[in-house]
């Protein structure tokens, strides 16, 4: 199960003050690598305005997982395209398709935040980012993951059936999700409507509430 955002339901500003206080008490001007994820989650919260609780919670989940994927690369320069693809794979069918619709709407802000804030984190060994996703690249990555998710749900993880899916079938479905402007969320909703989404058994109470609320969103609601 993708972990519940650590700061869900708590004071982000208080967490940042505590983190800064620890730095000050040690007479340091840097944070430990282990504090990077929490530091940037707080920074993200402080840069957001007029977001609904659901949108903020969803972007926090995505950002936490993205940063954890980035740290696993063990490199100082984080490849945004590669890490983003790995992050989408990490969520897969643990979240409903509406999760991806919200991230799609917020992606340009998320990518801008990462390119600006990651190099500014006060670490002893600085991280940089490169290989940003163009809008077309992002839409291709997202539609590809949604296509994979639909087959995973359709065949309930049966590897034999999944292995029989042709590249042509994958390409056809992926292209049906895309338009010249981006993604067709009504078409995506139509494909996923008969495919039952199941909340992971190890989800905690807050995650169940979050995922249930996501799963109830309609394409019209997502466009507002």
Image (cartoon, rainbow, N blue to C red):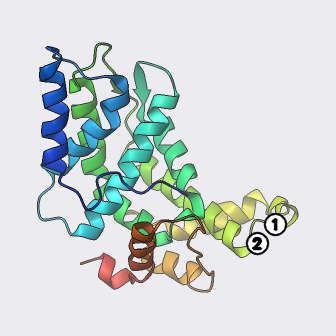
Q: What is the x, y in percent for residue 76? A: 41, 18
Q: From the viewer's perspective, tell me whether residue 105 is left or right of residue 141.
A: left
Q: Quadrant of residue 123?
A: top left
Identity of the residue drawn at 74% across and 71% down: 156
Position above or below: 59 against 53:
above
Identity of the residue drawn at 21% across and 18% down: 30
Q: Quadrant of the C terminus?
A: bottom left
Q: Quadrant of residue 185?
A: bottom left
Q: From the viewer's perspective, tell me whether residue 36 is left or right of residue 50.
A: right
Q: What is the x, y in percent for residue 142? A: 49, 56
Residue 93 appears anywhere in the view: yes
Question: Marks 1 and 2: CB-CB under 8 Å?
Answer: yes
Identity of the residue drawn at 60% across and 69% down: 201
Position above or below: 165 against 187:
above
Secondary structure found at label 1: loop
Q: CA distance from mark 1 to mark 2?
A: 6 Å
Position above or below: 140 against 27:
below
Q: What is the x, y in percent for residue 109? A: 24, 49
Q: Residue furthest right?
A: 160
**Label ID, residue 130:** none
Q: Nearer the viewer, residue 100 or 27?
A: 27
**Label ID, residue 158:** 1
Neighbor class of circle 1 (other Cα within 10 Å; few <14, some 14-19, many 20+) is few
Residue carrying label 2: 155
Q: Nearer the viewer, residue 141 or 157?
A: 157
Residue 183 appears anywhere in the view: no
Q: Residue furthest front?
A: 25
Identity of the residue drawn at 56% across and 63% down: 94
Position above or below: 202 against 112:
below
């Amino acid at each position: 199960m993708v972990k519940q955002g650590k700061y869900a339901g708590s004071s982000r500003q208080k967490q940042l003050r505590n983190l800064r206080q620890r730095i000050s008490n040690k007479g340091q001007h840097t944070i430990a690598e282990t504090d990077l994820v929490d530091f940037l989650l707080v920074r993200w919260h402080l840069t957001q305005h007029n977001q609904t609780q659901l949108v903020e919670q969803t972007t926090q989940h995505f950002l936490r997982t993205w940063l954890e994927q980035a740290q696993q690369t063990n490199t100082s320069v984080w490849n945004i395209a590669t890490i983003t693809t790995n992050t989408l794979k990490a969520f897969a069918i643990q979240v409903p398709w509406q999760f991806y619709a919200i991230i799609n709407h917020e992606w340009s802000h998320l990518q801008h935040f990462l390119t600006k804030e990651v190099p500014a984190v006060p670490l002893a060994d600085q991280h940089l980012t490169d290989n940003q996703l163009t809008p077309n690249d992002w839409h291709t990555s997202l539609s590809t993951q949604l296509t994979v998710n639909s087959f995973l749900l359709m065949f309930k993880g049966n590897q034999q059936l999944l292995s029989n899916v042709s590249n042509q079938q994958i390409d056809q479905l992926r292209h049906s999700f895309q338009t010249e402007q981006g993604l067709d969320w009504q078409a995506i909703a139509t494909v996923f409507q008969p495919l039952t989404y199941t909340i992971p058994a190890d989800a905690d109470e807050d995650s169940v509430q979050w995922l249930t609320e996501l799963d109830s969103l309609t394409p019209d609601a997502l466009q507002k």
